[in-house]
Amino acid sequence: MSHSVADDRLEVLQIYSLLQYIHKGDKERIKQIVEHGEAEKCAPLCFFMLEAGADPKAVNKTTGVTALMAASKAGSLQLVRAILKKGGDPNALSTERLSAVHLAAEVGSLEVIQVLSAYSANMQALTLKSCTALHYAAASGNANLWVGGDVGHSPDPMLTSYFSYTII
């Protein structure tokens, strides 16, 4: 059995497992997969859904979180690219005014931030608490992303957040 056939079978099994959780309405298991480092298991299903015509701009009505934001938070570079190519909005904001850039910065995903920047993501976007993506990066120990990271229009490190915090 070749490596690519094995990979394809694994992806089919992952998609089947996720569809089973969805069919059973096992929201807790789906939430665990998405939120606890298992997001890559969702990637094959997401690719399948995008190719089948899923709306790349779909929004969770409660949180305002988009698929692009979730993929950015997971650091899933391939999925971020796929969603953007299908028309995902790099400047969409959640109900807390978080963007995909904020979430990628929080987890330290330079590659995702660079791709979002290439799709004209607003690097200066402010959350409800006046925090930039750089605030999120700094708070999670990833401020080095902006030092020689070539992420484009970097936020002002002296900008004061709601809590009167600056990056420096």
Image (cartoon, rainbow, N blue to C red):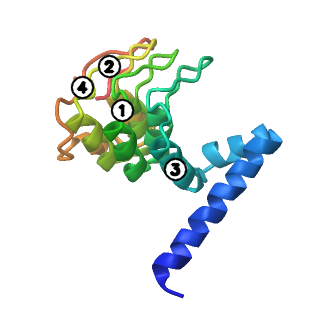
Alpha carbon of mark 3 to alpha carbon of mark 4: how far?
A: 35 Å
Do the numbered discs 3 and 4 sit on residues whose CB atoms are within 8 Å? no
- The answer to whether mark 1 and mark 3 are in CB contact below 8 A is no
Indicate which disc residue 155 carries.
Answer: 4
Query: What residue do we see at 55% from left, 77% from top?
Result: 6
User: In the rendered image, which residue does mark 2 sit on?
Assistant: 125
User: Alpha carbon of mark 1 to alpha carbon of mark 4: how far?
Assistant: 11 Å
Mark earlier in primary sequence (3, 2): 3
* Residue under label 1: 101
Three-letter residue code for mark 4: Pro
Which amino acid lies under the numbered mark 1 shown in the image of this protein? Val
Residue 26 picture location, percent across and down: 80, 42
Between label 3 and label 2, give the one nearer the viewer.
Answer: 3
The residue that appears at 34% across and 45% down in the rendered structure is 81
Disc 2 or disc 4, which is closer to the eye?
2
State if disc 2 and disc 1 touch (CB < 8 Å).
Answer: yes
Q: CA distance from mark 2 to mark 4?
A: 8 Å
